[in-house]
Image (cartoon, rainbow, N blue to C red):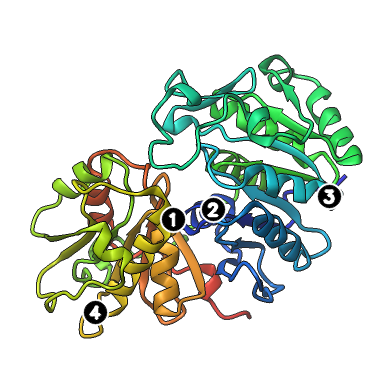
Amino acid sequence: MPDDHAVPVFAVADDLSGAAETAIALGMRGTRTLILATPHTAPHPHPHSADVLVLDLDTRTHTPDNAAHAITTALTHRRPGDRVFKKIDSLLRGNLAAEITALTRHGYGIALTPALPHAHRTVTAGVLHLAGTPLHTSDAWRAERATPPTSIAAALAPAPTHTLGLDLIRHPGTALADAFTHAAATGQILICDAETDRDLDAIARAATRAPLHLALAGSGGLAAALGRTRRAGTPPLGTPSPGTPSPGDQPAPTPPPLIVVGTAEPIATTQVARLTGYTVHSLHPDDLAAGPVPLPPLTTPTVLRVDPTAPLTPSHGRAIATGLALTVAALTTYQPPALVLIGGDTARRVLDALGVTTLHPLDQIHPGAVRSRTPSGTTVVTRPGSFGGPDSLVQIVRALHTPPPAAPSERPSP
C-alpha cells in the first residue's frame, strides 16, 4: 500500500477557483505546488518536480462528452505514483457523472463526497444537505439551466454506485479502508456520508491505505482532509517559516486591488456594499454578453461587477463572463498590483484574457479565498461565488496589505 505522506498528488478541477482551493488545501510548506490553467483540449505538459499539481480543465459549462474527454486527456499527464484527486463542486454542479465515469473507465475506483462542513454542506444517506435542507428543495441551483438532483446517486446516474453510511465512516476498525481497497480493485463508485471534518479525515486516512487506483473525488473539504493526512505535522502551504519578519518589518502595503465580481450569488451584493472607498461599476449582463464594455480610466479603487439588479439568462453565463474579462483586459492603462476575482468562471476568463496560464498558490485568506501569484509577479485572489460571509471582500482587501510568505514554488532549487 502507498504511504500518502510521501505520495505526490495529481488533481483536476472543473473551474479555476476550485483548482486554487484544492491546491492550497493539499500543499504544505517547503514543497512545490502549481496550478495550471489548461485548455480542455490540450493540457499543458506539467512540471515533474511539483509535489502537488492541479489542472483547471475549465469544463464546468462544457458538454458531458467534452468534459469526459478532458479527463481522459488529463490522465495521460499523470505521473506513476500520483494519487488522483478529482475536485467536484460542493453543490454538485457541472459534469459530475461524465467526469467520474471517465475515471472509472480508466480503471479507477472512486471514494466521493461533496461535503463541506464549514459551509454547512453535509451528506446524509447519500443526499447533499445545505444547512439541513436537501439540495433539491433549496434554491442553490437558481442560476442553473437544470434542476438539482434528488441524491448524489441520481447526480451520477446511470453509473452504478454504493453509499457508505456514517456508521461505516465512523467505524474504528479497518472496514472503511477495506471497502476502499475493494473499490480500487473493481472500479466501484462509493458515495460517502460525511457531516463533520472528522468524518472527512476518516475518509482521507482510509484512502491513503488503499492502492493508488482509488481516486478521491470531493469538494475543498475532502481536499483539506487529504492535505491534513498528507502533512502529518508539516505546516500547510502559506505558513510562515521560522524567522519570518514580524508585521512591522514587512514591506509597505500595496495599493488597493481591482475587484471583479461575476457571480450571481446574492451574498456578493452585500460583500461589495461593505467595502469603503471603492467606485463600483455595475455592468448590464446584456452589454457584457455583446463584448467588452468601454470604461473611463480608473483613478480610484474599483469594483467591476455584473449588475445584480438586472435579469440574468443562464444560457448567457459564459458570454457574460467573457465580456467581463475582456473589459478587464481592455483597461490597458490601469495595471493593478492585485486582482480579486470572484466566481470560478469569471476568474478563468479574466486570466485567459490576460494570457496567464500558471499560478503559484501562496496562502488562504479565508476558506475558498486563495491568494496566488502569476509568473510575472501579479497577485491574484480567487474565490467561489457562493463563499464567504458579508465581510469577505473586506477581509481580502485587508489581507492584501500584508505580503504572504514566499511560495516554495518560487524558490530556486538548491
Label 2 is placed on what type of residue?
A: Arg
Instruction: Report which residue position mark 1 lands on.
Output: 344
Mark 1 and mark 2: span between their CA atoms?
A: 9 Å
Query: Comparing marks 2 and 4, which lies closer to the viewer?
Result: 2
Residue at 69%, 47% (x, y): give it: 98
Mark 1 and mark 3: span between their CA atoms?
A: 27 Å
Residue 100 x %, y %: 71, 45
Q: Is residue 189 left or right of residue 370?
A: right
Question: Taking 202 as reference, is 14 above or below it?
Answer: below
Element class at badge 1: helix
Instruction: Report which residue position mark 3 lands on.
Output: 105
Instruction: Report which residue position mark 2 lands on.
Output: 60
Q: Is residue 355 left or right of residue 173?
A: left
Mark 2 and mark 4: span between their CA atoms?
A: 27 Å
Instruction: Report which residue position mark 4 lands on.
Output: 331
Q: Is residue 370 left or right of residue 297?
A: right
Element class at badge 4: loop
Element class at badge 3: helix
